[in-house]
């Protein structure tokens, strides 16, 4: 008859022979004749881990719970086994039930706190348990508690230098970086990502296969944090290092890392375009992303088709800002075709993207019409408007879809309104585009105002002859609004209000006019009226799709820099929360 030692030897032999299910049976037989509580708990935890590793997670959790039913004892060895079971139960509860996980980790941390106070050898288990609970708090979006645990683990490591090995220390910093990123605290995110990166770079010199993915992730996240801090050159530098890491990894495992490489090229293109106005560089990055997503889409069309459509769309947008802007059409048309296919499959997921690309093509037709004076572009525009109408009507109601519908209405008015007034209208639009470029090219307010005055003068003359014109109605209102803003920057509030009232008289739904009228209230000493108007704008977007909360903050900052906002008014805005970060 077999005894305890026989069953244990048998189980260990089966494990070595890679027969874990059979080993469980031998361990269970050993549990029936186990001589001590400690051995019973150790074997129970071992059986639970084997069950987990063989895919039987519910049975593993039940086994860990059974270990906790052992008689209570203050013996460190018994307490250690209890803490081990609790930590495993916490881990098994993630990510589905972080609240339950926190409960288990609380108990294990209490045990390891007591054990480590008596014996520093338990500090490693204590630190690891803190990090595990930090992850659970992160999943519950309780960021303060999560940070507290990761910092406590690092503090344990500072006091007991072997509490965390180098990789775990780097992971703690990496997770802190992620939390600070979610809190829009880019400075502290950057600091922690850099500490993690330093360790991973050191490891990559010895084991590149293990550490290069971690290096790439840190470089990417550092790019994002520099982007948030408006350190755009640094962001480019880190994105380029991210590309280097993923290019190396793609040689080893292309099926795993090509999507990351493509996404990084996409991010770099957006950075070049949106933040540095370097559209040629953006276009090069965008074309790289297209090539990679073409490859990925061939093997997994359902997964990557919409990424490919977005890459074509972005490339077209970048090309529109280059001297070769007419080349944008082929990429925008390709994006439109793909997004149409995607929308036919899932209107809710892709309908808005389809409409956005259609808008850009309509704007391309508008530009061609103004440059080439070819009426065929009017016909194409009207055909696309008719095609998009049912899609547009199917979009769910939201501020974004409302803005989009307004844009389609404006372009519909434009393309339908090209008649006897067409030539003058196109001439004014062409001149306005040139004058807008001059306005954007200078920081001098008086120079900006001189070009804006030309725009207003040409529109005033035009509307004397064509007072019912609808095509230029919105541009006229926006031009009045823009001149009003420039007057505000000069402190000429009375003149600004006259211009803004003229703009408002056009009775268009333009929140930008409301925003500038609120600025007038503010500068005239009517802070409560201004605050009320500001609050009504929250959640709405401007012509550049930026939330008005952020627009208001940027406007107030500019007005303060021009010395037209008294310090006490600025303080009033701070007290009212107007200047708090928009998340």
Image: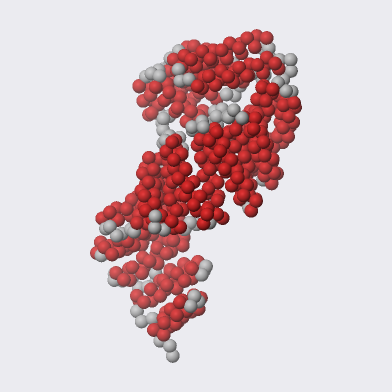
Q: Specify the color scheme.
A: secondary structure
- Please tell me which residue is depicted at 47% across the width and 43% down the height of the picture: 240
Q: Is residue 505 left or right of residue 551?
A: right
Q: Residue furthest bottom?
A: 1
Q: Nearer the viewer, residue 527 or 430?
A: 430
- Please tell me which residue is depicted at 64% across the width and 37% down the height of the picture: 331
- The answer, for residue 101, to whether it is visible in the render is no
Question: Where in the figure is residue 572, as x and y percent of width and height?
Answer: 38, 25
- The part of the image, by quadrant, that contains residue 6 is bottom left
Question: Where in the figure is residue 261, as x and y percent of width and height?
Answer: 53, 48
168 versus 403 height, above or below: below
Question: Where in the figure is residue 21, as x and y percent of width and height?
Answer: 51, 76
138 versus 511 height, above or below: below
Q: Is residue 531 left or right of residue 307?
A: left
**Screen quadrant of the N terminus:** bottom left
- The answer, for residue 418, to whether it is visible in the render is yes
365 versus 94 height, above or below: above
- Please tell me which residue is depicted at 51% across the width and 50% down the height of the picture: 247
Q: Is residue 69 left or right of residue 485?
A: left
Q: Nearer the viewer, residue 369 or 513?
A: 369
342 versus 452 height, above or below: below
């Amino acid at each position: 008859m077999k005894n305890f030692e026989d069953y244990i030897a048998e189980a260990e032999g089966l494990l070595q022979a890679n027969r874990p299910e059979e080993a469980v049976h031998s361990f269970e037989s050993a549990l029936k004749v186990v001589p001590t509580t400690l051995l019973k708990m150790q074997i129970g935890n071992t059986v639970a881990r084997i069950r987990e590793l063989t895919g039987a997670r519910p049975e593993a959790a039940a086994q860990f719970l059974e270990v906790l039913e052992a008689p209570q004892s203050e013996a460190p060895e018994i307490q250690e086994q209890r803490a081990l079971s609790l930590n495993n139960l916490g881990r098994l509860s993630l990510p589905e039930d972080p609240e339950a996980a926190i409960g288990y980790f609380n108990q294990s941390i209490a045990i390891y706190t007591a054990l480590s106070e008596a014996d520093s050898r338990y500090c490693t288990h204590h630190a690891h348990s803190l990090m595990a609970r930090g992850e659970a708090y992160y999943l519950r979006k309780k960021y303060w508690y999560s940070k507290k645990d990761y910092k406590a683990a690092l503090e344990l490591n500072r006091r007991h230098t072997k509490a965390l090995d180098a990789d775990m220390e780097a992971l703690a910093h990496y997770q802190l970086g992620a939390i600070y990123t979610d809190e829009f605290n880019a400075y502290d995110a950057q600091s922690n990502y850099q500490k993690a990166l330093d360790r991973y770079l050191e490891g990559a010199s010895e084991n590149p296969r293990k550490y290069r993915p971690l290096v790439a992730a840190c470089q990417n996240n550092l790019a994002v944090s520099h982007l948030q801090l408006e350190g755009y050159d640094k962001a480019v530098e880190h994105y380029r290092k991210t590309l280097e890491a993923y290019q190396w990894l793609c040689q080893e495992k292309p099926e795993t890392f090509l999507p990351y490489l493509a996404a990084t090229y996409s991010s770099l293109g957006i950075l070049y375009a949106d933040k540095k106005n370097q559209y040629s560089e953006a276009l090069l990055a965008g074309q790289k992303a297209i090539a990679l997503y073409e490859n990925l889409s061939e093997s997994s069309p359902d997964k990557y088709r919409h990424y490919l459509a977005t890459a074509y769309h972005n490339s077209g947008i970048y090309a529109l800002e280059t001297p070769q802007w007419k080349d944008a059409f082929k990429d925008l048309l390709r994006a439109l075709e793909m997004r149409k296919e995607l929308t036919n499959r899932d209107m809710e997921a892709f309908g808005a993207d389809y409409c956005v690309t259609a808008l850009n093509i309509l704007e391309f037709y508008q530009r061609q019409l103004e440059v080439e004076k070819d009426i065929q572009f009017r016909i194409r525009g009207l055909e696309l408007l008719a095609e998009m109408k049912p899609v547009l009507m199917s979009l769910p109601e939201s501020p974004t879809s409302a803005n989009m519908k307004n844009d389609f209405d404006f372009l519909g008015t434009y393309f339908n309104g090209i008649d006897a007034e067409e030539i003058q209208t196109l001439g004014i639009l062409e001149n306005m585009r040139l004058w807008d470029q001059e306005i954007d090219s200078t920081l001098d307010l008086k120079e900006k105002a001189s070009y804006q005055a030309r725009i207003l003068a040409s529109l005033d003359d035009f509307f004397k002859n064509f007072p019912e014109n609808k095509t230029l109605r919105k541009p006229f209102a926006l031009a009045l609004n823009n001149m009003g803003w420039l007057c505000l920057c000069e402190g000429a509030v009375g003149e600004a209000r006259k211009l803004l009232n003229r703009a408002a008289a056009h009775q268009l739904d333009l929140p930008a006019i409301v925003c500038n009228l609120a600025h007038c209230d503010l500068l005239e000493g009517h802070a409560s009226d201004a605050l009320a108007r500001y609050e009504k704008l929250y959640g709405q977007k401007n012509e550049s799709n930026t939330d008005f909360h952020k627009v208001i903050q940027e406007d107030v900052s500019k007005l303060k820099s021009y010395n037209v906002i008294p310090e006490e008014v600025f303080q009033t805005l701070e007290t009212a929360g107007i200047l708090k970060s928009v998340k």
